[in-house]
Structures are given as C-alpha cells and as structure tokens.
Image: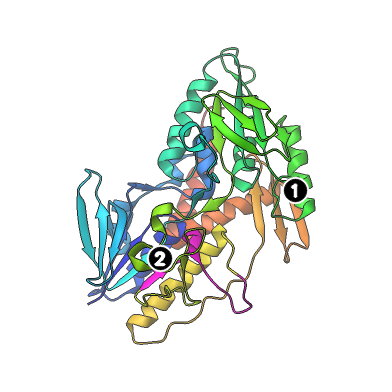
Amino acid sequence: MSRIVIVGGGAAGLEIASLLGRSVNRQDEVVLVEGETHHYWKPRFHEIAAGTFDSDLDSLCYFSHGAKNGYMHYQAWMIDINRQDKQLVVRKPNGEADTIEYDYLVIAIGAISNDFATQGAKEHCLFLDTPEQARDSWHQISTLLRSGQERTINIVGAGATGLELAAELAKVSAKLAKNPYAAKLNINLIEAADRVLPNSPQKMSDLAQSRLEQYQVNIMLNTRIASVEASRMTTVDGKILTADVQFWAAGIKAPDWLKNIGGLQSNNANQLVVEQTLATTADASIFSLGDCAAIPQADGTQVPPKAQAANRAAVHLAKNLVAHLEGKALKPFVYKDGGMVVAIGHNFAISTLMNDRLVLKGRLVRRLYDTIFRLHQKTVSGLFTMSRLIIIKRLKCMFKPA
C-alpha cells in the first residue's frame, strides 16, 4: 500500500488528486491537504473580488468531491517536511500541529504576488493570492460600491491579474451607473513597464490597453511605487496617489516559507527546483509542479508560470505516478505552449496562438477563456458533471433577474 499526499487544492493539486483517486488501486491512498473547504479556479479570483463570481456553480467542495473521486480531503496547511521519517507537518484550522505520513509527496501550492519588499505594501494593499483574500477584497469593494460617491481604486501591476481585475471592476461600476446610491469607481492601473501585459506580444498589449481605455481605466505606465500607506501610494518620483482601496498584483514568487523547506533545493524566487520528471532534486519521493516549482526543459528553458502549464503538468504527473506505482520509470514532462488568453470583462478577451504569431480578440475569444475553465471542470469532475453545469448556468442566466 502506498500513500500519496498532495499539498495544495488549486487547479494543479485538485486535478492530480482527482485523477489519482480515480486511477490508483484500492489499497493505495490519496490525501489532499488544503486549508480551504472549497476550490475556486485561481484565474477567476478577480471575479470573486468584483462580486461577479457564481459561487453556487463554479466552486467545488473538497470534502464531498473527494468522497466521489477516491481521495480524502485533510483540512490543514503545510508548515514543514520531516523527510527522514517521511512525514508532512501541518497546522489544522484550530491551530494545532499534526503530522501526516506519506510514501510520495506532491507540492502544488502555487505562487503569491511579489511586493518586491515595497514599504507598506503588505500592510496596506489587498492581494488576490488565496480565495480568502479574494473574498475579503469583495467585502471592501461591496462596501465601497454602496457609498454613493466617487471612489478611487489603485491597482499595482498590469499583468493578467491586474488587468482583468481593473476591467471587471470598471464593468461593475458601469452597470451600477444608473443607481443613484452606487459609487462611481475611478480605477488607476499602475505599471512599472512601458506597456500593459509587458511579457506578451506588443499587439496584445496594444489591444488590451485600447479596451481598458474604452472602460475608462486610467493607465499609468513607467510608474514605480516607492511606498504604500493607508489610502495612498508614493511613486519613486514623489507623486502621491490617493485611493480608497489599494490592490497589489505585480510579479509572482513562491511563498517565503517554502524556501529550502525540509532541506529541498529552491531558487531565488523560493520555487522548489525539480528534475524534468517533476521530482525534486534532493528527494525522489517528493514532487512539485505549478508556479511553486522551477521546471526545466531539455532546451535549457523553464516552464512558464501559467495556468495551462500547471494543468498539463498535473495530468502528466498523475499518469506518471500511476505507472510508477506499477514499477515503471518516470517520464520527463515536455511543455508545449498553447498561447495565452486574457479576459477583459465578461464579453471580451484577447489571446495569442501559434507561438505568439497570431493575436485574436472579441466575444468568441472570451468563450475560449470559459472553455479553458470548463476543461478544468471536466478533468476534476468528468464530462457529465461539466455538461450539466454548463446547461444549468445557461438556464440560470436566461431566467435570473437582470
């Protein structure tokens, strides 16, 4: 009997737990360690923060899902690894410490925003790294929207997360414009680079900026934040940017506590260094994937921190571990980039295809964005459940009040 313990219930961790739970022999055990009770797809955290997320149909309860898919949900957070005794040290919701024995350990905790040690950012900014942070953000935004006055929101970082959040909040504000008691949101999107989506093709950046300007988002390029205080930010050139709510969505890194945990090798971004098989360099029984792992490729490049990369690595590792339990050798993970899709509101998105040579935009591309989420649902719950959810959601949209 083997016990496979998976840490992290994000897209990658949940997919591995679901696939393994349905595939391994009955004598083997699959345990998912996750502090949250429900799963939310991280690329949609900005919708939770803006109040447009359908939690009834688009979230998932780990406890009941695990019972149906052959894994056990253990509600806790990882705090250390005892590699000698093959034990995971965790903290339960009541604050007590506990240990979980494992034969194989998979770490898929994702990444967090990188505040680059900016003074006051942690204390005075909202982040969208966890479902709890996204829900807390909505509580503040909800209160702001009910104020009936003009309000300002600062968002630092014009990558995919910051851009999608700005667009979603702008659309919410526009929809509430006819309500005399609703606040009008003035949104500042602040970026240190000379364009939005700085790691994307120029054409994609231009299309995104044009759309945001149509939504009346104030884009501030070549602007670096030196410090953050309550209700205001100061740029490196001394300009003061006041705001009622402040978000930080610039850069990513693995959590600080992950660095060298259990004696595992990590890099400057706190990511665990792994082989191309996704096994950590220091321990062949511990694997890591997603944004918390530095995954090499045969050509010397690294797998980029994208949701699609985490999903594909999850499917690969699940198959690899099932085969490994049968005595077969681990196969290397080979990543082929399928492009990028960024949603700008509920009816518009832009994407890149063919190694960034083709850039598409429009409503149909927004449906592609939704399809990526549906494929995730298919992996974790099966084709029948995914199809049922699509039908129910369409009926709900047709019959619910405007």
Please state the horizontal and vertical placement of residue 392, each as a whole percent of the image.
48, 45
In the foreground, 242 or 354: 242
- The residue to which callout 1 is attached is 205
Q: Nearer the viewer, residue 297 or 13?
A: 297
Q: Amino acid at mark 2?
A: Ile
Q: Which secondary structure lies at badge 2?
A: helix
Instruction: Please report the residue visible at 44 percent of the width from the left and 53 percent of the height from the top.
Output: 255
**In the foreground, 122 or 214:** 122
User: Which residue sits at x=33%, y=55%?
Assistant: 65
| First in residue order: circle 1 vs circle 2 | 2
List the single residue furthest toward the front. 237
Residue 240 placed where, x, y %? 65, 25
Single out the mark in the foreground, 1 or 2.
Answer: 1
Image height of 279 relative to 198, above or below: below
Question: What is the span of residues highlighted in magenta in the rendered image?
Answer: 286-301
Name the residue at 46% across, 62% down.
379
Residue 382 visible, this angle? no
Q: Quadrant of the N terminus?
A: bottom left
What's the mark number on residue 16?
A: 2
